[in-house]
Image (cartoon, rainbow, N blue to C red):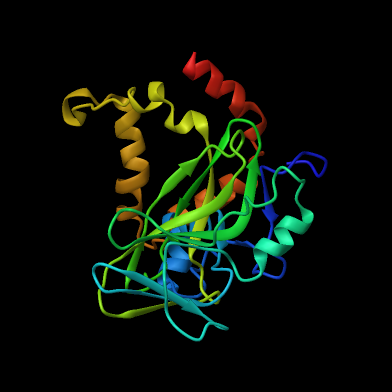
Amino acid sequence: MSRTQDPIVAFHRLIPGIPAPERADRSGQGMLPTRAYRYCDAVTMAAGFGWHLFAPISFSLFWDGEELLWTTEGLDAWLPLGAAQFPHFRASFDSAAPEDVKGFSPPFLTALPEPGVVQMWTGYFARTAPGWSLLLRAPANLPRQPGYDAYEGIVETDRWFGPIFTNLRLTRTGVQLDITPDRPLLQVQPIPQVAYAEAVLNGAAVRDALEEWQEAEWDDYRASIVAPSLDPDPTPGRYAVEARKRRRGGVCPYAGLAKAAEAVAG
């Protein structure tokens, strides 16, 4: 990607001082086993694909099975959660917003109609290059924090400019859930829209391998499975080494993906 080319994604921070997005770490923030980090390219690629987003502040949730409560530093009590603004954000938003936008600041926390589900805004908006979307999901290959699951979502941020949020489904009742900015809450991954186009997803093939494989497939099988098994001095992580060499020699392909998406959709 050239230095003059627009970034594939631009994060817009609306709340000053909150943690910046971080490039996801191939080591899973040091939590992956050493053997996986050294030899398993599939695991480390997934761990390092995208960016981590964090909760903008520390806060706590409590769900008794019926009512949702929340609290944060500066509050003297637990408050019922309907829709809550980030502390002091509404005033700063209204002071910067055009007259017709004042009063429309996005909420920080919202209790959704589904039992035990909370929507949390990260404090960011995002815009992607044409033909690209963002997949929002729990951090890949990191241990889950007990007490909640994060829903996954795909947002077409090349045309929709809105809050980047996550929906958290609380899984425990009667237990205080503490969420802090010191661990990733979301992994944001760029995906070309052609990847989930109906023509692509409906075009998968299932082949009966033993009956249909030709010499090309058997040659690839020999290279990937048989040859390493017969090697008297096998090299650990052969796939990882070859994959990294291939990536080092590659070019950034995203400029042509929007046209490819249009061709598939058309």
- Quarter-wise, where is residue 95 in the image? bottom right
Q: Which residue corresponds to the image point at 57% horizontal and 45% vertical from the top-left? A: 246
Q: Which residue, as the protein is rendered here, is positioned at the far top?
A: 266
The answer to whether 190 is drawn above or below residue 118 in the figure is above
Give the image quarter of residue 116: bottom left
Judge whether 191 appears above or below 102 on screen.
above
From the top left corner, tell me how far across and down residue 266 is, in percent. Answer: 49, 13
Q: Position of residue 208 (x, y in %)?
A: 18, 28
In front of the other: 197 or 207: 197
Q: What percent of the width, then of the height, locates residue 226?
A: 30, 47
Q: Position of residue 78 (x, y in %)?
A: 42, 80
Q: As drawn, which residue projects farthest toward the right?
A: 4
Position of 227 compared to 85: left or right?
left
User: Can residue 217 be seen in the rendering of this structure?
Assistant: yes
Relative to the observer, which residue lies in front, 163 or 95?
95
Q: Left or right of 121: which side holds 15?
A: right
Outermost bottom residue: 76
Q: How many marks?
A: 0
Looking at the rendered image, the quarter that the N terminus falls into is top right
Please indicate whether residue 21 sits to the left or right of residue 32 in the image. Answer: right
Residue 182 occupies quadrant: bottom right
Residue ID at (55%, 62%): 52
User: Is residue 20 visible to the viewer in this orientation of the structure?
Assistant: no
